[in-house]
Structures are given as C-alpha cells and as structure tokens.
Image: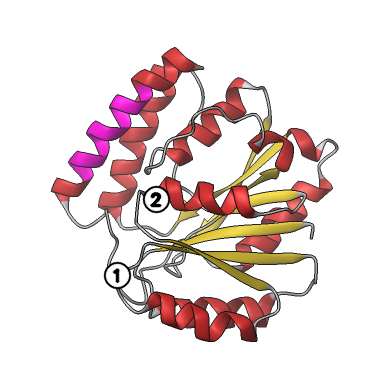
Amino acid sequence: MKLQVTIPCYNESKNIPLLLERFRKILNRNDVGILLVDNGSTDNSPAIIRELVPNYPFAESIRVERNQGYGFGILSGLRHSKSEYLGWTHADMQTDPFDILRGIEILESANQPQNVYVKGLRRGRPFFDEFFTFGMSIFESIYLGASLWDINGQPNLFHRSFFEVWEKPPSDFSLDLYAIYTAKVKDMEVIRFPVEFPPRVHGESSWNNGFASKWKFIKRTIDFSLKLKKGL
C-alpha cells in the first residue's frame, strides 16, 4: 500500500458510518487506505467498527483498550501501518476525506517526497477559533523560531522514513506541534494546502468545548513547547 492514513476515533459512533461512506465515494485508487483506531471509546464505536469495517476493503481497524490521549491513538496507528507513506486526520467529518487524496498527490509530485511534509491549512472556521489559532501560531513561531501556522490543521502526510526518526513523541494534542516542528528542524519542505473546515455533523469535540478547555490547551501547549525547544 502506498498510503494508509490513521484516523483516531474516540466516541465517534455517529460519524464513523459517514466517514466510511465518504471514503467509498471519493476513493479512486486502490493503493490508499485508512486505519481506524478505536482510541478507547466508551460509546458503541467498537461495535460499529466491528460491524462496518469488513464491508470496506480500503479500511482496517485496531483498538486501544484505554484512552491515553489523542496522540497515543495516532502513534498506535502509525506504528501499525506498513505503507510507504503515513499520515493522520480526524474522524469528526470536519476534515473532508477527499483532502487526503489531494495531499498524497502533492506529496507524490514533489521532487524529493521523502523530504516533504504535507499539511492542511484550515479555512471557514468561526472567528473566535481563528483568533485563538492566530494567537497560538504567533507565540509558537516566535518562541520556537520557525513558521508554525495552524498547527492543528489536517490532514498530515509524510514518508515513513520521517516517522522512523521521531524520538519520544507526545501522547496528547501536542503531537501536531511535535510533528511539524520536527519537520522544520530537519529542514524538510513543509507544504500547506487550503482545506475547508465546516461545523461538526455529530457529537462534540473532546477538547474544544469552551474557554476553559482552550485555556487548558494553551497551558499544555506552552509546557510542551518548553520541552520541545530544549529537546530538539
């Protein structure tokens, strides 16, 4: 397989059928697939995944028995995948699966795809979310000395060789920051492309649900940034 994209699923029972159907409709090549990681869900996501995934040849699934963080679910999937290219995106249907096909085409068309990191750049978000992202981007770019905009944009795609050099990647939402900053430090070409980011169809974000959650995210990101600057 050329590319298998990891999609962590935590209590996304209503979105999983939509996600699989969307992939079925847009997938126009047989060397691209997805890996659903049931990231310790407590709803009926495990049953839905067991029932539906066998009906979709491009899909595979694994389960993490206990939720240990967003990043932990993604890392579990990346370690499981055997494809030449790796990546991840979200299961909440705010990121269109078609963006994965756009991203792999960008990656494959590069002169040196092994040295390229492809990442979506979100558009169409609420003003407060855009303002929050802008502020965090300014802080990270200045503090870490690299251009780091819309750190949590999806999808993320890269050659397997990049993942193999990661050292102690974080198990929480800091994984997106770790990955793009590591790519910058290693002088990889980071290619961003615009993606639409509509409201969630079903469910609620497990972290982005108010000012308190954003403040917690800010503190956690700053703490990790201090470690990241020292470590890399």
Q: Horizontal and vertical percent for residue 164?
A: 67, 34
Query: Which residue lies most toward the left here?
Result: 212
Which residue is nearer to you in this view: 45 or 32? 45
Q: Relative to 199, say whether 183 is above or below.
A: above
- Asked which quadrant contains residue 14, the reply is bottom left
As helix, strand or loop, the secondary structure at mark 1 comes to loop
Q: Residue at x 85, y 37 (%)?
A: 111
- Asked which quadrant contains residue 230, the reply is top left
Q: Residue at x 51, y 86 (%)?
A: 51
- What kind of colouring is applied to the model shown? secondary structure
Q: Relative to 132, say whether 50 is above or below.
A: below
- Is residue 150 shown left or right of residue 52? left
Q: Residue at x 38, y 43 (%)?
A: 173
Q: Is residue 46 magenta?
A: no
Which residues, given as a range, are shown in magenta? 214-225
Name the residue carrying label 2.
70
Report if residue 133 is visible in the image.
yes
Name the residue carrying label 1.
42
Q: Residues within 10 Å of mark 2 (few under 14, many from 20)?
A: some
Q: Horizontal and vertical percent for residue 116?
A: 72, 37
- Is residue 169 shown left or right of residue 191? left
